[in-house]
Image (cartoon, rainbow, N blue to C red):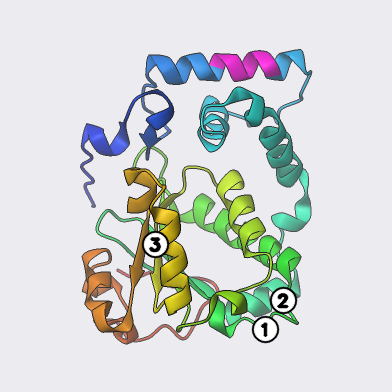
Amino acid sequence: MITLIFLVFYIKHGEKEKHCRKIFEGVQYDQYEVEKIKELEAEIQKKNIKLPDNWTQSDTLKIVYNSKFKIKDAIPRLQDHLAWRANAQFHNPNPEMIEFISQGLLYTFGRDYQFRPVIYLYTYLIDQKKYNKDFMIMVLSFFLGFVKKSMLLPGKVENWVFVVETNSQGVFSAPSGLGDIIKTMALNFAGCLHKMVVLNPSTGLNLMWSGASAVMDDDAKAKNKFITKKHLDQLKEIIPPTQLEKKFGGQLENCNKFWPPQIIQ
């Protein structure tokens, strides 16, 4: 049996618009969060927006967080999210999606020190002529939905670590529509990302990150980690060697079966 101990700071810290929350289920929200939930609920009722039967208060709060507590921005994001929820193509895999996952371009393997699942995406191996932006949104929607449903534990483990292997891929060689893909996943899986790890970033990507991070708050910067091949051992600060493949400096044999996901004891 695994015992997880969280500090109050981890569950939620910060005030008002500077809030950062890792756990949304089975916990008490503070006064500001409750006020914003009520504001959004009032707007939902005013605009006569129909919510799914399985909608929860934590779903509302996640939309509030994704909108950075700006209720005027929350309504269009909520409508986009509801449309995504209702679209079966994002939740039911087709043969092409299973083929993509089975190639090892996208898989989950092992967990971090807080039992969060680790997801890997190999951007440099993706054939952009074959797999366009719309396909990537579909396959990521299905796969992340599977991980959320099958590998997270509400109130205990509500986030994942996402590792992107770029193999020094240049900025302009990255998957087309990458900004839209990230934005779509951030909305529809709000609150799920603990850390994004970018392996072997190119010089251009490093420079771009340096510029972007200069205007980010500390929490946003902490969510992102860039690791070069020279400093690959830093990955073991995030993921235990017993949960990490040998190609990344871990103790496990490299994964060669990607779907369904392998469970590491």
Three-letter amino acid code at the position of disc 1: Asp
Residue nearer the viewer, 73 or 55: 73
Residue for badge 1:
127
Residue 222 at what x, y percent from top left? 32, 52
> Is 53 included in the stretch rendered in magenta?
no
Please rate how many residues cluster around mark 2, counting C-alpha atoms within 10 Å: few if below 14, some from 14 to 19, many from 20.
some
Please rate how many residues cluster around mark 1, counting C-alpha atoms within 10 Å: few if below 14, some from 14 to 19, many from 20.
few
Three-letter amino acid code at the position of disc 2: Tyr
Residue nearer the viewer, 39 or 215: 215
Residue for badge 2:
131
The image quadrant of residue 27 is top left
> Element at badge 3?
helix
Q: Do the numbered discs 3 and 1 sit on residues whose CB atoms are within 8 Å?
A: no
Q: On the picture, is 41 further left or further right than 96?
A: left
Please identify the dominant SS of the magenta region: helix
The image quadrant of residue 22 is top left
Q: Distance from label 3 to label 1 (Cα)? A: 28 Å
Three-letter amino acid code at the position of disc 3: Ser
Q: Which residues are magenta?
A: 38-43
Q: Distance from label 2 to label 3 (Cα)? A: 29 Å
Residue 205 at what x, y percent from top left? 47, 71
Q: Nearer the viewer, mark 2 or mark 3?
A: 3
> Element at badge 1?
loop
Q: The C terminus lies in which quarter of the figure? A: bottom left
Is residue 60 visible to the viewer in this orientation of the structure? yes
